[in-house]
Amino acid sequence: MEKILVIILLLSPFIGFVINLLVGKSIVGRKTTGLIATTAVLISFVISLYFFIQILSTGTIAYIRLFEWMTFKEFSVDLSFTLDQLSLLWLLVVTGIGALIHIYSIGYMRDDRNIDRYFSYLNLFIFFMNVLVTGSNLLVTFIGWEGVGICSYLLIGFWSRNQKYNDAAKKAFIMNRIGDLGFLIGIFTLAYLFNTVDYVSLKQLATSPDPLLGVAAFALFIGATGKSAQIPLYTWLPDAMAGPTPVSALIHAATMVTAGIFMITRLNFIFDLTPDIQALIAIVGAVTSLFAASIAIAQTDIKKVLAYSTVSQLGLMFLALGLGAYHVAVFHVITHAFFKACLFLGSGSVIHAMGGEQDMRKMGGLKKVMFITYATFAIATVAISGIPPLAGFFSKDEIMLAAFEGNKILWVIAALASLLTAVYMFRVLFLTFFNDFRGTNEQKHHLHESPKSMTIPLVVLAVLALFGGVISLPGGLSWLNHFLEPVLPQLAFVEHTLSTEAIVLMCVSTVIALAGLGIAYYLYVKKMSVPAEDSKITGFAKVLYNKYYIDEIYNALFIKPMYVLSTFFEQVVEKFLKNIFKGIGVIFGILSFPAKKLQNGSLGFYLFFFVLGFSVLIICLFLV
């Protein structure tokens, strides 16, 4: 029974993908495609909830071995899946948030002519994400890892008539391949060291430091950097905004970008043995957090702000991982899924009302006509800013406290990133929903609240952003830490109690968030400032607006030289090789010319050579 349920959990979204891809809107109808896809994900969510309740009551982990996948000498890999505490938390987030995004998409994509293809891709994405988080070994995880990569390519470039969207999809695909190569090298290195890639076996065998273990950890970190968009492989994520807004919510909030966090947490015992790599993870995470936050503060596209916000928040999660605070990273993954999905879907509701407009300079005053969207967006904004008592406050405070105990410099960097987070998020809120409307009269007449299929998921996510922090309260009241103890038995930090230091740091974090709110309120409500037009942006603001020109630098350092190299190979090397092989062909043609003369069409001549050849063969066999 357990095996059947796990198979249904995994295959339900895949079946939804197949049905919508093969049957589609032409047979089952436009509305039915969305219902089929949503039902498929809800089935996975319900079964995940069943296993979650089972593990809460009995502590029993579900392990399903389907068959032996491959064997080479002493090395073997099973196609098997594990539903333990860590994978079930991710499953609940992926299928739960995924189901809400599917429901939202029914309203958002109802007029799209390729709605069946959209929902089939969405279902396939959930299927591969389920495989990724339930795989009991690195190779099964890698199947899901690559699967979400190809699905993100399909979804980002879904509106393929726009060449910019196609370019964004290719960019995401190629940059992820760089990280994936690192992941593969890490897998091969661990397989060489321990003759297994099974998580349980690796945990038993990896007990002491080793130089090759450091190589494996670094390679795995590169893989996580690509998938979770950290410096230097982060530039694909903001461009991924080319996809439909529900896709942005799915990729950025709870699924694909958290895969790197999941992988490092799953292999925590490897990274605990490589403190240098842990320190590198913490530094890269802190720097990425501040770097992305500084870019977000100057963006005018509402989805671009949220995209860089995601990069920044992922940086905070990496900071926690690098400090060994795996529980805290998982906690922030969960709370981030709630408020960031709400923010992205809220931005989609705004864009839907604005007729596709994404520039905040042309918005304003929307709370009068879109109160539900405004209220939910405001709750999520308060949550991500780290203002108590919302969910984001508790998870971000845990990261800040771990950073303060681990490295004061990293704490300062994280504090600055948190300040900027509050500024740019309230900047979005005030520019979009406050003051007077700045768009055209046509847009003004088009303004309306989104349908219930879009607002209900917003309300659910806002409620989760409000109360999600209760799963890990400070002062030894963390349910999450206790739940994850079988997977993360040894904390690299003492569970935080309400000491004087902890309370002071909580107050400092709150003051930082409120200061960001105050700065944004003064600039965008009190002074009613509006970002300048592109041509009028000057100074450092222009550098921030152009994202430190990182794309241009990458283009100059990597892309153009690659084009030059490929042109050289095409026009010089390829032509040279072609002429060599063509010349060899000409030489053999000349050498074979006398032999061609023997083919004169005379049957007697052919018979003579047949007898001659047969005689030579007899002599060689019997006389020599």
Image (cartoon, grey):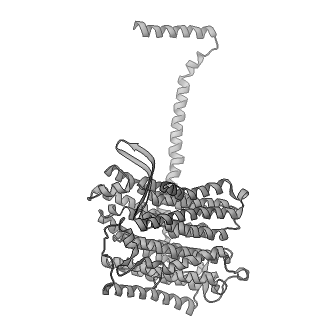
Is residue 449 shown to the viewer in this render? yes
Is residue 162 shown to the viewer in this render? no
137 or 483: which is nearer to us? 483
Q: Is residue 536 above or below residue 116?
A: below
368 or 497: which is nearer to us? 497
Q: Could you tell me residue 439's position as x and y percent?
A: 67, 82
Q: Residue furthest bottom?
A: 526
Q: Residue at x 64, y 55 (%)?
A: 19
Q: Residue furthest left?
A: 208
When asked about the image quadrant of residue 327, the answer is bottom left
Q: Could you tell me residue 614's position as x and y percent?
A: 51, 9
Q: Is residue 283 left or right of residue 104?
A: left
Q: Could you tell me residue 371's position as x and y percent?
A: 63, 84
Q: Residue at x 62, y 54 (%)?
A: 18
Q: Could you tell me residue 314's position as x and y percent?
A: 45, 71
Q: Is residue 541 above or below residue 283?
A: below
Q: Residue at x 51, y 50 (%)?
A: 568
Q: Residue at x 33, y 64 (%)?
A: 277
Q: How many marks?
A: 0
Q: Is residue 75 above or below residue 490?
A: above
When asked about the image quadrant of residue 326, the answer is bottom left
Q: Quadrant of the C terminus?
A: top left
